[in-house]
Amino acid sequence: MGLLTKDFERVPCTVEVSHKFESLHAHVRFDNGAVVYPGDEVTVHGPEIMAPFGEIVIEQREATIARASLLERFWTRLTGDFEVMELCEFSFSEEVAL
């Protein structure tokens, strides 16, 4: 990994898409134990996965992890706290806004 260059890693993965009343989510697990670090980007290959309502779809896919350069990783760690603070500006309540 260089200061300005990215490395690319292709990994097998399992994709789980849930479209249930109790849980609406999509998760990717790397089957080879690969870890994603700050600034890395993941692209899962293949067609879009659509789970019908009430079901969970699990598929084996391949993903590409674009590893962040050292400079990108540093910048992500430096600015990441500011992005999290933006989320703190919002509150959730049961009151209806008029």
Image: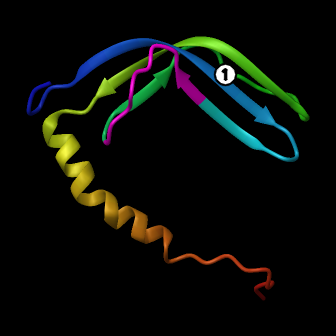
Q: Residue at x 38, y 32 (%)?
A: 36
The image shows residue 60 at horizontal and vertical percentages of: 63, 11
Which quadrant of the structure image shows residue 1? top left
Q: Which stretch appears magenta?
A: 28-38
4 or 25, which lies in front?
Answer: 25
What residue lies at 63% left-to-right and 22% top-to-bottom?
Answer: 15
Label 1: element kind = loop
- The residue located at (22%, 42%) in the rendering is 73
45 shown above or below 43: above
Q: Residue furthest bottom?
A: 98
Q: Image height check: is 24 above or below 42?
A: below
Q: Residue furthest front?
A: 33
- Residue positioned most to the left: 3
Graded by Cα atoms within 10 Å as few (under 14), some (14 to 19) or many (20 or more), the crowding at tag 1 reads: few
Judge by depth and name the residue closer to the eye, 77 or 35.
35
Q: Is residue 43 left or right of residue 37?
A: right
Q: Which residue is under mark 1?
A: 48
Q: Nearer the viewer, residue 30 or 40?
A: 30
Q: Is residue 9 above or below residue 41?
A: above
Residue 86: give x, y in percent of width and height.
Answer: 43, 70
Q: Quadrant of residue 35?
A: top left
Q: Is residue 79 left or right of residue 84?
A: left
Q: Is residue 32 magenta?
A: yes
In the image, residue 59 above or below residue 16: above
Residue toward you, 48 or 89:
89
x%, y% of residue 93? 73, 80
For the point 40% across and 21% down, the residue is 34
